[in-house]
């Protein structure tokens, strides 16, 4: 029971911290919104993806949901570095609870914030004529929740080794933005060069975006992604969570 309470306390701490730093909401949603407005408008007259079945703003919309998750996962894990500098992390690590509670509580808090902000962005779908039924919303939120856990766990694993927020930000942007570009968020990926196709196939966000598009329109981003696009995403989420646990426990001796 004390482990469950520890997870809740860490999760609740992340939510409280977010509520007191509301500028994080604008930071995580502002850039994706600007991307959607400017690129969506700029390419709408000259780029008709998928044989013209969708407008470019509609095509770009799932990728923007993914970007909201990405930026929130990035910003939320800044707190891990701050907690280390303030001594909170060391105190939590030696407390009489299981070590997995620290990892799970922090990742769950970051994932909750990411899902919350992406869910807010769902409210903009009608502006580009994307209809959202209750069933579609639930399926999209399930996909977003899985992606949020995966990216939050990956961010945790990387932040655990970092001593500088600036360094963590640089590494995350260097890693996350190429992953986002190669997911099919920005352009169709069916007919890309062979070398790029290899990168796309090993990119976790490719399958995450495919799941989101499958939830919205009943079809995956690419035909080869998966007949069940949620399976690879769930697998990547479990992998990144395991990696976060492993890295945290391995470096425990420093605390």
Image (spheres, rainbow, N blue to C red):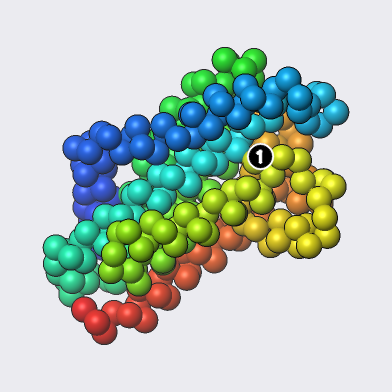
The quarter in which the N terminus is drawn is: bottom left
Residue 101 visible, this orientation: no
Locate residue 54 relative to residue 31 in the image: left or right: right
Locate residue 32 relative to residue 102 in the image: left or right: right
Q: Residue furthest bottom?
A: 253
The quarter in which the C terminus is drawn is: bottom left
Q: Residue drawn at (44%, 39%), measured in percent from left and top?
A: 115
Q: Position of residue 227 (x, y in %)?
A: 78, 48
Q: Is residue 160 above or below residue 26?
A: below
Total number of numbered discs in the rendering: 1
Q: Residue drawn at (41%, 31%), measured in percent from left and top?
A: 30
Q: Position of residue 220 (x, y in %)?
A: 74, 41
- Of residue 136 and residue 170, the one placed in the foreground of this image is 170
- Of residue 29 and residue 170, the one placed in the foreground of this image is 170
Locate residue 165 relative to residue 54 in the image: left or right: left
Disc 1 designates what residue? 186
């Amino acid at each position: 029971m004390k482990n469950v309470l520890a997870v809740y306390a860490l999760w609740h701490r992340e939510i409280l911290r977010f509520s007191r730093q509301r500028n994080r909401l604008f930071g995580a949603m502002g850039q994706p919104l600007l991307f959607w407005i400017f690129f969506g408008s700029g390419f709408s007259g000259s780029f008709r993806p998928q044989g013209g079945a969708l407008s470019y703003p509609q095509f770009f919309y799932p990728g923007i949901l993914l970007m909201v998750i990405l930026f929130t996962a990035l910003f939320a894990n800044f707190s891990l570095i701050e907690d280390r500098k303030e001594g909170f992390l060391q105190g939590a690590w030696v407390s009489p609870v299981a070590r997995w509670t620290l990892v799970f509580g922090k990742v769950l808090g970051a994932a909750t914030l990411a899902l919350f902000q992406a869910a807010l962005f769902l409210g903009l779908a009608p502006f580009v004529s994307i209809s959202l039924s209750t069933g579609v919303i639930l399926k999209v939120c399930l996909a977003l929740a899985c992606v949020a856990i995966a990216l939050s766990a990956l961010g945790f694993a990387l932040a655990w080794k970092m001593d500088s927020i600036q360094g963590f930000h640089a590494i995350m942007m260097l890693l996350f933005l190429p992953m986002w570009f190669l997911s099919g968020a920005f352009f169709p990926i069916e007919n890309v060069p062979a070398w790029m196709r290899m990168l796309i196939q090993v990119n976790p966000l490719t399958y995450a975006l495919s799941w989101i598009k499958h939830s919205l329109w009943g079809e995956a981003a690419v035909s080869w992604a998966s007949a069940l696009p949620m399976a690879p995403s769930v697998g990547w989420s479990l992998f990144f969570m395991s990696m976060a646990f492993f890295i945290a426990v391995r470096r425990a001796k420093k605390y």
